[in-house]
Amino acid sequence: MAAQPARPDRGRPGTASVMDAPPFQPPLVKAVFREVTPFHVSRSAARAAASVTRTVLTEIIDGARSAAGEEARRKLIPSDLLRAIDRNVELEVGDKWYGHSPTFRGRTGVLYDAQGVIVPPPRRSRSRKPSAVVGAHRFEAGVKKLLRSRGVGAVPAMVRDLDGIASFFLTDLARDAAMVVREGGLQRFGTVTLEPPGEQAPPPVLKESRQDLSSRSGDGRTIGRDDILAAARIQLFGGDLRQRALREARDATRTTPTG
């Protein structure tokens, strides 16, 4: 009997077979960008945005997986997400989703109007106008793929939260990338480095001059890869997650045509 070809290991986190097929495809990325900006999005920019989103969601899932592991669980629940964010401030991204999710209602606090009446949380929009909330379900397949790649599952409420965070994060990334194009570079945001109190900050992994960040090349109608990298610097704190997201985005676009 002929030997059967080896099947890829789908259960082990970070296997090559998982990483070769990005969970957030460029067409989905471009669809999100079209909802917030009229600028053309290059192929390398779409791949970079997909890579940054994947890196961020993977880090969030890994943090939640670690929290669940302390209770010997392989299925993630919303409290694992809260514990992951509490332990790592870098994971606090896509925060506009928090007002729409019961998971975060206690964290955002109770809002009162001028008369002291409690303001109810925002409802899911029924408008035909596209929004990050309405479009969050589009990320479900990618989120589930990421969960499988990390060797865990998640209850529906947790999948919903990861969908929402991914949708709002990518939407904000698109807005900031468009701002970079309009302003001709990264004008208003510097580098932020997080370090424990009393410890000296480590040297930056990526050496970038102020001139590199404050100017851009290319036309004023197209969002390119470097515009995505600039937007990622705005969205992410200056810690390990930011550096890894930038590095992996560069790797993902190393052989991608710029058009």
Image (spheres, rainbow, N blue to C red):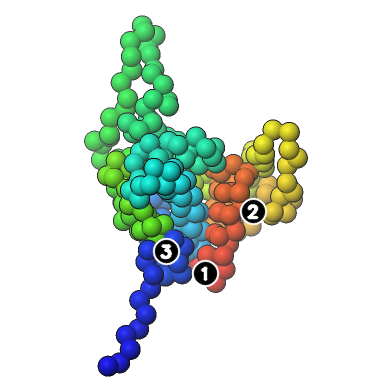
Query: What is the distance, in whole Å, between disc 2 and disc 1 at their CAs?
Result: 19 Å
Report the residue marked by disc 3. 12
Closer to the camera in the image, 144 or 35: 144
Mark 3 or 1, closer to the camera: 3
Front residue of 197/226: it is 197
The residue carrying pointer 3 sits among few (fewer than 14), some (14 to 19) or many (20 or more) residues within 10 Å by Cα, namely some
The residue located at (52%, 37%) in the rendering is: 87
Q: Earlier in the sequence, mark 3 or mark 1?
A: 3
In this view, the residue farthest toward the bottom is 1
Q: Residue at x 36, y 27 (%)?
A: 105
Q: Residue furthest top?
A: 115
- Residue 138 in percent (x, y) is at 31, 51
Q: Amino acid at mark 3?
A: Arg
- Seen at 63% across and 48% down, the residue is 185
Tell me the element at label 1: loop
152 to 87, vertically: above or below: below
Residue linked to disc 1: 256
Residue 63 appears at what percent x and percent y? Answer: 47, 46
Looking at the image, is 13 positioned above or below residue 195? below
Q: In the rendering, which numbered label is found on residue 100? A: none
Where residue 201 sits in the image (x, y, percent)?
73, 42
Q: CA distance from mark 3 to mark 2?
A: 40 Å
Residue 77 or residue 236, whichever sits in front: 77
Tell me the element at label 3.
Answer: loop
Does residue 234 appear in the picture of this structure? Answer: no
Looking at the picture, which amino acid does disc 1 mark? Thr
Q: Name the residue: 53% across, 48% down.
A: 177
* Mark found first going from the N terminus, 2 or 1: 2
Helix or strand or loop: what does disc 2 sit on? loop
Compared to 192, does 6 lie above or below? below
Q: Amino acid at mark 2?
A: Arg
In the rendered image, which residue does mark 2 sit on? Answer: 216
